[in-house]
Amino acid sequence: MRTLWQHCHAATMTGGRYAVIEDAAIVTSAGLIEWIGTRADMPSVTTDRVVDLGGAWVTPGLIDCHTHAVFGGNRSGEFEQRLQGVSYAEIAAQGGGIASTVRATRAASEDELLGSARQRVQALMRDGVTTIEIKSGYGLDLENERKMLRVARRLGEELPVTVRSTCLAAHAMPPEYAGRADDYIDHICEQMLPALAAEGLVDAVDAFCEHLAFSPAQVERLFIKARELGLPVKLHAEQLSSLHGSSLAARYQALSADHLEFMTEEDAMAMAAAGTVAVLLPGAFYFLRETQLPPMDALRRHGVKIALASDLNPGTSPGLSLRLMLNMGCTCFRMTPEEALAGVTVHAATALGLGDSHGSLEVGKVADFIAWQIERPADLSYWLGGDLPKRVVRMGHEISN
Ligand code: DI6
Ligand code: FE
């Protein structure tokens, strides 16, 4: 079925930048964009259907390229403790933090995890998200990491959203390996990752590179294994301190390095040279009341692609709105609304290895787009969340949300 979508303006995001077509027409067919341009330039084609978008602004479907959407329980009690002055590190030292979510996730059945994650993913979808990355990392053993990754796959099968799954087994130390981080990394490399990859559950491999998690040397062993298995890598780096994990990620042609508040100019240069995307997570910055800002000027000066994501997780960013992250990217990190929009479309696609098929409105790409009833694209960053009127098109078909 060939559909013509017209009476709209399009923010195409082609070439990795904010680019606009006024009075645009979009022809979709077989789930792909067959033609896009100004209505005046449209060649005469026969279409099965013509849709009037009522003067809407069309953007690519939004992409949330960093989430931990699957987990058991929640940590609102720890939020209250932190408001009383207890730090994230102190809570972790008392057996809370990631460890408490690991206990709750292990205790939950696959169907229970699916049920709670479905609601969170649907909340993101109501914001115009058509592609989402979901990490494991609260199971920390083969059986429970598998359970999380299976939930991620099932969400992609049952909801109209494209899901990329990332194995984050190297997120924290499982209690069984307390004090034996190198042994746990060996276990991931020799047992867990090969098994999960063979089951088709892993699209990318991630790790948490930090003093309270894994060292650059341990992460590198994991990256070598990922390369052997033909899997791309990404990394949580420089969130709380500077270990140059982002430079390490760049050396392994990582799809992305994420967080980055404490990165250096040299890290930015390495990432630019490797094409590694900087994924900024203003929800975690805000929720932890962080004050160290990512080096925006260095990232821009060296031409690093910048993505924005929710980091949806129970400990540091219970963020159910990617559009709220657009606002926070602008307000907290001084991004422009154009940069923020590129960060949840074209650069987010690259951060997931989907740059050839998603993230911009151009011929041959998947026809995922949102027609927003807004006056200007900057409105997407301006409102603090909330449900903006819109129509969501995924793979060329309008879906209700
Ligand atoms: N960095 C984060 O912000 C989350 N994971 C990570 O590596 C925190 C996850 C949690 O506290 O549950
Ligand atoms: Fe994260």
Image (cartoon, rainbow, N blue to C red):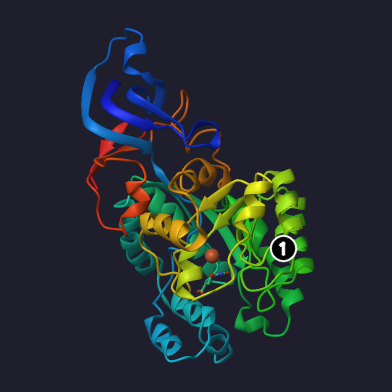
Q: 283 or 107, which lies in front?
A: 283
Ligand 1: image quarter: bottom right
Residue 330 position in % (x across, y down): 45, 56
Q: Label 1, secondary structure: give it.
A: helix
Note whether 210 is above or below 335 in the view shown.
Answer: below
- Residue 51 location, quadrant: top left
Q: Nearer the viewer, residue 269 or 229?
A: 269
Residue beneath the point at 77% across and 61% down: 220
Look at label 1 and name its amino acid: Gly
Residue 31 is left or right of residue 226, and the answer is left
Residue assigned mark 1 = 245
Q: Position of residue 76 (x, y in %)?
A: 37, 81
Q: Is residue 233 above or below residue 61?
A: below
Task: Bin the neighbour count of mark 1 within 10 Å (Cα to Cα): few under 14, some 14-19, many 20 and up.
Answer: many
Q: Is residue 374 left or right of residue 107?
A: left
Q: Is residue 142 visible?
A: yes
30 relative to 353 in the view: left or right: left
354 vs 168, nearest the viewer? 354
Q: Residue at x 76, y 67 (%)?
A: 216
